Structure formats: structure tokens, C-alpha cells
Image (spheres, rainbow, N blue to C red):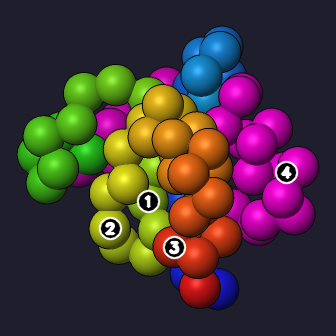
Amino acid sequence: MKHVTIYTTPTCPYCIKAKELLDSLSVKYTTIDVSEDTEKRDELVEKHDWHTVPAIFFNKELIGGYDDLQALHDENTLMEKLT
């Protein structure tokens, strides 16, 4: 299974939804709180031109935000993408 990383903030409702979706599928993930780690936030912008949270990665590939994750789930391709 690919490693999942979510760049997040504690109060972001879409970050919470993304984590709840992954939890419901028993997918393990690492969270990076960009409200506390400004270097990671800057890296997200500089390397990926991504300015919002959540930013969801499978291995080192940026999948997108919550809507992108939910779309993969709705298309029944999320688990396939993770393998």
C-alpha cells in the first residue's frame, strides 16, 4: 500500500472529512500540521504550487484535496490507487 500523507490544519473541516474517509477504509496516513510547521507549508507551496489544505499525497504524488479524494472513492478507484 502506498504511503498517504495529509497536510492539514486542526480546524479545517475538509481535512477532518478526508481523515474520516481514510479512517473508514482503515487506511493509515501521516498528518503534517502546516499551522505549526511553516517550513512544510512553504515547501507545499514552492514544490507543488498548492495553497490550501488538505493536500493529500499518495507516496510523493499530489492527489489533490478532499474533493479529489472523495471523487476517487465515489468512482471506486481509491483503494486501487493506493495499491
- Of the two numbered discs 3 and 4 on the same chain, state the one appearing first in sequence: 4
Q: Amino acid at mark 4?
A: Asp
Q: The residue under label 1 is which amino acid type?
A: Phe
Residue position for label 4? 23
Q: Are marks 1 and 2 in contact (CB under 8 Å)?
A: yes
| Secondary structure beneath label 3 | helix
Q: Is residue 44 above or below residue 67?
A: below
* Callout 4: SS: helix
Element marked by disc 2: strand
Label 4 neighbour load within 10 Å: few <14, some 14-19, many 20+: few
| Residue type (three-letter) at the residue carrying disc 2 | Glu
Q: Earlier in the sequence, mark 2 or mark 3?
A: 2
Figure quadrant of the C terminus: bottom right
Image marks 4 and 2: residues in contact by CB distance under 8 Å: no
Percent coordinates x, y for residue 18 in the rendering: 65, 37
Residue farthest to the front, as pictured: 75
